[in-house]
């Protein structure tokens, strides 16, 4: 993934940051700093597009039984376990997955938490369509689904009218890693990736570019 983290938009527009692979704790610090600057009028809306080293995150609705291995065993496998303040249940982040953290002024945009999640789903469905993948919503569960399974997970937090956290899109993720958890707390539903759906390689950089274009518009 591209390592540059310079703004790709004018100051008044959405700033796109592409810092490459970032540890989960550091990415959370980056989000909080950008959100504080936006709330205080010191900075623009920002979209972070990045990857994480292997990490399982537990949202506010997560329960321990949705993590199927002990912390010690996860550490032995090189997977971090983190409790976080986003909504949703448990999910996996790792190489081959693009994570997006939009820091947006939802109050100014007139979006509540529910409508904002639908907005994120619509953006991802459009990006997937550009690659020839049919993505759709499931009326029971947040996220984006395909005929092969869930391809994008979402979990957000809204603080002072500003959004944090966001979405994770499986591009070329090792789907076996989701066997460490009950993904999003949903039993018996498969997880998919773009490469699996297409049966062909997909470049992470290309997906990042398409996501940046979709949100900048």
Image: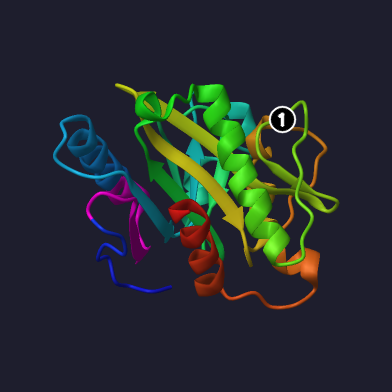
Secondary element at image label 1? loop
| Residue 125 appears left or right of 30 | right
Please identify the quadrant where the N terminus is shown: bottom left
Q: Is residue 100 left or right of residue 104?
A: right
Residue, far right: 147
Give whichever of 39, 13 is nearer the camera.
13
Q: Is residue 77 visible?
A: no
Q: Is residue 40 above or below residue 72?
A: above
What residue sits 85% from the left and 51% below the top?
Answer: 147
Q: Is residue 19 magenta?
A: yes
Task: Give the vertical position of 213 relative to 215 (above or below).
Answer: below
What range is drawn magenta here?
Answer: 11-27
Q: Report x, y in % for residue 23.
A: 35, 55
Q: Which residue is mark 1?
A: 141
Colouring convention used in this rendered image of the protein: rainbow
User: What is the x, y in percent for residue 160?
Assistant: 29, 21
Q: How many marks?
A: 1
Q: Quadrant of residue 9?
A: bottom left
Residue 17 position by quadrant: bottom left
Spot occupied by residue 56 in the image (x, y as percentages of width and height)? 51, 45
Packing grade of label 1 (10 A; few <14, some 14-19, many >=20) is few
Q: Closest to the observer: 207 or 81?
A: 207
Q: Is residue 55 visible?
A: yes
Quadrant of the rendered image containing residue 194? bottom right
**Residue 137: image x %, image y %?**
74, 38
Is residue 163 one of those drawn in magenta? Answer: no
The residue shown at (64%, 48%) is: 152
């Amino acid at each position: 993934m591209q390592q540059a983290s310079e703004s790709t938009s004018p100051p008044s527009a959405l700033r796109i940051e592409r810092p490459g692979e970032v540890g989960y704790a550091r990415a959370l610090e980056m989000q909080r700093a950008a959100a504080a600057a936006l709330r205080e009028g010191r900075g623009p809306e920002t979209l972070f597009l990045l990857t994480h080293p292997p990490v399982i995150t537990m949202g506010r609705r997560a329960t321990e039984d949705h993590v199927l291995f002990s912390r010690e065993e996860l550490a032995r496998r090189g997977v971090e376990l983190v409790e976080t303040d986003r909504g949703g249940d448990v999910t996996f982040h790792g190489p081959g997955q693009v994570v997006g953290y939009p820091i947006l002024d939802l109050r100014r945009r007139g979006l509540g938490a529910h409508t904002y999640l639908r907005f994120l789903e619509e953006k991802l469905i459009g990006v997937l369509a550009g690659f020839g993948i049919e993505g759709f919503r499931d009326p029971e569960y947040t996220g984006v689904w395909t005929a092969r399974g869930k391809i994008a997970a979402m979990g957000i937090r809204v603080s002072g009218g500003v959004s944090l956290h966001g979405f994770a899109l499986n591009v070329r993720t090792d789907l076996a890693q989701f066997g460490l958890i009950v993904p999003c707390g949903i039993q018996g539903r498969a997880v998919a990736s773009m490469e699996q759906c297409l049966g062909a390689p997909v470049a992470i950089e290309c997906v990042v570019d398409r996501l940046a274009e979709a949100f900048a518009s």
